[in-house]
Amino acid sequence: ELNDAIYRPYVFFFHPSEGGTFVAMCMPFAFALFAEEKHRRLCIAALILGGVFLLLNMTRGVWAACLITAFLFIPKFRRCSLTLLPLGAVALVILLVFYSETPLAQRLLNPNNLLIRFLFWKTAWGYFLDQWLFGIGFYNFSDVYSESMNQAPVEAYEEAANISTVDNMFLMVLVEQGLIGFIGFTLLLLLLFRRMLQSRAAMLQSGRRLSARMVTASLAGCSIFIFCGLMADVHLFAKASKLVFMIAGMAWGVALSPVDGQDRDREAVGRFL
């Protein structure tokens, strides 16, 4: 606990994975407004503060989600990726050689947390196969897992014997709500993305490019939520889950605003913010 508190000082007030996911989901809006001159300084400050927070947050799943989302939504990032990869490799070597004892290097390079995840992902998949239609019930994974660990203790990974979630949003839904719950959950996410994509296309067609950028930022924010969900049960984080629906709702609101012209487009975005 003391080691966590050194580089995660808010660990007792805000779960690191939830804090990282929440901040990362807000970052695309700063990118979207960067092109507007009057918002540029505020966007720069938001990007710097958010970037520092994500760095200190030390949550690798959030870092990976941000990189994947940037690759999908930022064309310049895709074009520069071939250049950025060698630079990233050089930075990693420097980190290994000169800063291997720092908390950042230890957090980045320690594979134990990932190896533990493979262990209880495999265990959770077995629970799903046993109760594949309706699942084991909401919030029951911790109890079922604890019983199995008591019967077959794992000496190699003490941390694996004390978990309460699967650390994978989709697998957690499969285990606890079964195939029926998983289909419903997936359809809900697909509906959110489909409506936002339709709204973005309609706004681009009508020339409302600023509003379209904000809806694109909404898509990117919700995509970060999905990608973070591959390494954490982010659907159980109340703040991040609420933010998904808030973002989607605001995007639909902008799309439904009956405005014409660039100035009125800015007004619609102002209501969005």
Image (cartoon, grey):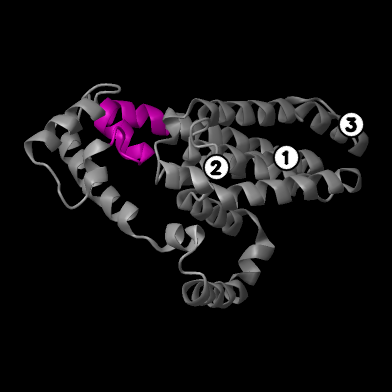
Between 88 and 78, the residue placed more toward the observer is 88
- Residue, x 52% and y 48% (percent of image)? 7
Q: Which residues are magenta?
A: 163-186
> Does residue 252 appear to the left or right of 151 in the view shown?
right
Q: Amino acid at mark 1?
A: Met
**Residue to which mark 2 is pinned:** 20
Please give the label number shown on residue 214: 1
For marks 2 and 3, the one nearer the N-term is 2
**Residue 216 shows in the view:** no
Q: Amino acid at mark 2?
A: Gly
Between 266 and 23, the residue placed more toward the observer is 23
Please give the label number shown on residue 102: none
- Report the mark closest to the observer, 2 or 1: 2
> Does residue 195 appear to the left or right of 266 in the view shown?
left
Above or below for 87 versus 262: below
For marks 1 and 3, the one nearer the N-term is 1
Label 2: which secondary element: helix
Between 175 and 154, the residue placed more toward the observer is 154
**Residue to which mark 3 is pinned:** 264
Q: Are circles 2 and 1 on residues that touch, CB within 8 Å?
A: no
Label 1: which secondary element: helix
Q: Quadrant of residue 208?
A: top right
> Does residue 198 appear to the left or right of 170 in the view shown?
right
**Location of residue 210 in the rendering, given as x and y in whole percent from the top left corner:** 80, 42
- Residue, x 67% and y 28% (percent of image)? 252
- Residue, x 59% and y 33% (percent of image)? 195
Label 3: which secondary element: helix
Question: Magenta segment: does it hold 90?
Answer: no
